[in-house]
Amino acid sequence: MISLLINNQIVNKHIRDARSLIATQDPNAVSAAIGVLDGVLALSPRLEAALELKARSLLFLRRFREVADMLQEYIPSYRVCSAATGDESSSSLSSSGSGRVVWESREGAKLLPKCEDGDGGSRCFSILDIKRKVIAGIHRACDREGQWRYLILGQACCHLGLLEDAMILLQTGRRLASASSRRQSTSHSDDTFTFSPFLPPFPSTNPKTNTNPMTSSLHPSKPPSFFSESASTLLPHIKLLLRRRAAATSALDAGHPNEAARHFSKILETRRGTPHPFATSCLIGRAAAYRAAGRVAESIADCNRALALDPTSIPALLTRADLLESVRCLTDCLRDLDHLKLLYDTIIRDRKLPGPVWRPLNGEIRYRDVPSSLRALTARINGIRQRFAAGEGNNVDYYKLIGVRRGCSRSELERANLVLLLRHKPEKAGAFVDKLDFSDEDLDVDAVRDQARMSALILYRMLQKGYSCIMATVVEDEVVEKKRAVAPPVYQGVFCRDMAAVGSMLSRAISVKYEGLTC
C-alpha cells in the first residue's frame, strides 16, 4: 500500500513537471516533457492523463508517425483490416479505398468503447434507477475523456495521408462533442461544434505558427475555440480532396483519361498543402491517366515524382517499367525491374510488407502473392535481357515517347518538343515539393528535390535525343522531297516526245501503190 502511494506521488509529480514544460511551448521543452511522460507510462501504462499529454506533445512536434504508432488500434481501416485478414494486416483494405471501405469502417469498427446513457424518464424512486444514473454518468465521463483520441488521431491521420480515417475520426469526435455539449446545455443545436472545457484545445501542427496553447487543461477557464476552427477548416478540405479523387477515378474508369488527369492535377496543385502520401497515390493515378491518353512522357514524369517521394512504391516502379518497355528503352526498364526484385526479396526476407503496419497498401500487393509475383518478375527480366542481347535495346521508339506520328512535319515535331521541354525542365522538377505537406520527420525534403531533378534530367536528355533523331529523319525526307521537286521530268519528257513522233507520223501521207489485178 505504501509503495502504491509512493508511485502515485511520483506519477503526479511527473505529470506536473510535464505540464510545466509543455506550458513553455518550446519544442525542446516539449521533447523533454515527452521523456518525462515516458517515465510516467512505465509506471502506469494506462494512465489517461499521461497518454493524452504525450499524444498532444507529439502532435505539437509534428511527429505524426509516433501518434499513429501509439494509437494504431483506433485507426478504423487498420481495425477492419486486422479483423478481416488476421495476421495479414496489409490486405486489400486501404485508407484510400472506395466508399464501400469507408462504410464498412464506419459500421464495423468500434473506435472507442461506448455505453448507452441512462434513461432519466423514470418517475419511480428506485435504487436501480439511481445506480443506472450513476453508471451512466461514469460512462459519459469516460466518453468525454476518450474524445481526445478521435481528435488527435484524426489530425495525425490527415497529415499521414489516411484521409478516410481522418474524416471518420474527426466527424465522430465532432458528434461526441456536440452530444456532450447538449447534455450540458440544451441551448446548443446539432450544428454547434464546440467542446466542453474539460477537453483542451487541439495543438497547432504548423511549425511556423505554433502559437496555440497546449496547456488549456491547466487553465480550464479558457474558451476551447481553436479546435472548432481547426476542424471546421480541416474537414471540408479532406472532403474536397476525396471528392476530387473519386471524380478522377470515375473518369478514368469511364474512359476519359484527360478528364481524370485534370482532376488529379487539381488535387496536386491545391493552394493548401496536400499530404505527401496522398499526393503519391494521386501522382500514380495521374500517370495511369496519361498512359491511357497516350502521353508517355508525362506519365514517366509523374512516376519519377512518385518515386522521389516514395522510393519503395511498387505501383510506380511497375508503371514506369511498363512505359519504358513500351518505348523499347530496355536499359532503364531493366533497372526498375531489378529494383522491384530487390523489394520483393526484402519482403520475403523480412516477412512483412514495406511501411508501417497501420498503413494498408490499397490492394497493391498482398504478402501471399509475393512469391508468385517474384517468379513472374524473374522470368520477365530474363526475357528482356535476351531481347537486349539481340540488339533491341538501341531501337527506342522516340515517336511514341514524344507523341508524334511517323512521317510528321517539322512544325508538328517542333511544337510537341517545345511543349515537352518547357514542361519537363530539370530546374523546375522540384517545384511540386513546395505544394505538399510533409509529415515524415525522417524524410529529407532536399533529397526529394534532388532525386526529382535527377530523374527529370534523365527524361529531359531522352527527349532531346529523341527530338534529334526524329528531326534528322524529317530533314532527310525534306531533302528527298526537294530533290524530287527540282529534278527534270525525265519520264514525262520521253513520253511527250514519243507522242509527238506518233502524231507527226499520223499526219504524213502514206504512199500507196495501185497495181492492176490481172486474171
Image (spheres, rainbow, N blue to C red):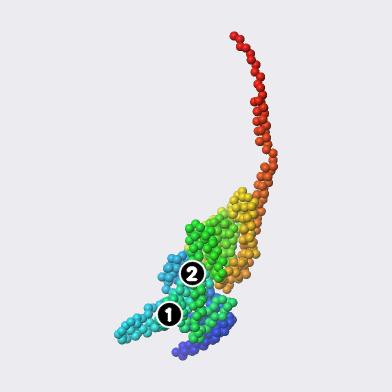
Q: Position of residue 330 (x, y in %)?
A: 60, 55
- Residue hosting label 1: 188
Residue furthest to the bottom in view is 2
Q: Which residue is mark 2?
A: 239
Residue type marked 1:
His
Quadrant occupied by the N terminus = bottom left
Is residue 349 visible in the rendered structure shown here?
no
In which image quadrant can residue 449 be found? bottom right
Q: SS at mark 2? A: helix
**Residue 184 in view:** yes
Amino acid carrying mark 2 in the image: Lys
Q: Who's the residue at 61% across and 61% down the image? A: 423
Could you say which disc has been placed on residue 22 in the image? none
Identify the element where label 1 is drawn: loop
Quadrant of the image containing the C terminus: top right
Seen from the viewer's position, the closer of residues 283 and 238 is: 238
**Up-down relation of residue 35 to residue 278 (above or below):** below
> Where in the figure is residue 187, as x and y percent of width and height?
41, 81
N-terminal of the pair, mark 1 or mark 2, is 1
| Image point (53%, 63%), residue name | 264
Mark 2 is surrounded, within 10 Å at the Cα level, by few (under 14), some (14 to 19) or many (20 or more) other residues, namely some
Q: Nearer the viewer, residue 159 or 404?
A: 404
- Of tags 1 and 2, the one toward the viewer is 1
Depicted 380 relative to depicted 170: above or below? above
Label 1 crowd (10 A; few <14 / some 14-19 / many >=20) = some
Toward the viewer: 123 or 103?
A: 123
Residue 271 spot, x, y in % from top left: 56, 69
